[in-house]
């Protein structure tokens, strides 16, 4: 998993550039398809990033790890945005049906998501700060973004019934 890969920094790895990264979300998607929803985040997030590190020349370097972790974080961000939009549309229909009877689900969703973004960013900044400005700071931040975004995506998917 990601927490283990951060400890395996190779000093002899070749430099990695963004165009050299070998990333596919298939490993994460296959893992999620094979497991019940309750185990998906803890077991599946990071599997594509780990495979990327293995498949990319220099993938276990600090730069390679950061690039692969960022690629999977971007994948999860896309999943999060699609899920958020789906849930927002679902909540808008519910708001229309209930009228003024209860609080707006769309507004509650928006406020929850804004608060989560603040929480995620602060959490990841804290985790990165533990590297004291060292080279592990970037991969630590990317790994945190990946983990937190994957967790929020699954949470929203559960709320939407996806």
Image: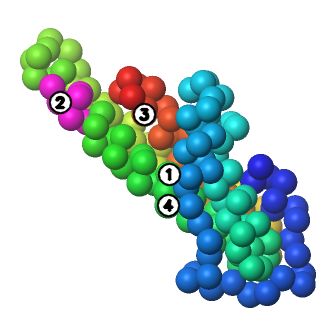
Task: Give the distance between the C-alpha atoms of the residues marked 4 and 3, in whole angstroms.
Answer: 17 Å
Tell me: residue 51, above or below residue 86.
Answer: below
Q: Which segment did they paint magenta?
A: 88-93
Q: Identify the disc placed on residue 76.
A: 1
Q: Identify the disc placed on residue 92.
A: 2
Give the percent coordinates (x, y) of residue 161.
Answer: 38, 23
At mark 2, the secondary structure is: helix
Q: Is residue 112 magenta?
A: no
At mark 1, the secondary structure is: helix
Give the percent coordinates (x, y) of residue 142.
Answer: 63, 62
At mark 4, the secondary structure is: helix
Pointer 1 local density, CA inside 10 Å: few below 14, some 14–19, many at least 20: many
Residue at image coords 63%, 29%:
35
Tell me: residue 25, above or below residue 103.
Answer: below
Residue at image coords 67%, 70%:
66
Tell me: residue 26, above or below residue 152.
Answer: below
Chain-order first, disc 4 or disc 3:
4
């Amino acid at each position: 998993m990601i927490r283990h890969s951060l400890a395996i920094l190779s000093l002899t790895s070749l430099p990695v550039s963004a165009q050299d990264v070998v990333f596919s979300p298939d490993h994460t998607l296959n893992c999620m398809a094979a497991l019940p929803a309750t185990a998906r985040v803890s077991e599946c997030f990071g599997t594509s990033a780990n495979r990327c590190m293995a498949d990319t020349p220099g993938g276990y370097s600090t730069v390679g790890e950061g690039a692969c972790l960022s690629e999977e974080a971007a994948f999860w961000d896309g999943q999060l945005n699609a899920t958020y939009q789906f849930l927002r549309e679902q909540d808008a229909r519910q708001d229309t049906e209930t009228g003024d009877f209860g609080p707006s689900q769309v507004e509650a969703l928006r406020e929850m998501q804004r608060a989560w973004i603040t929480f995620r960013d602060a959490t990841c900044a804290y985790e990165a700060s533990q590297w004291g400005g060292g080279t592990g700071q970037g991969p630590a931040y990317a790994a945190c973004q990946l983990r937190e975004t994957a967790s929020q995506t699954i949470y929203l998917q559960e709320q939407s019934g996806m």
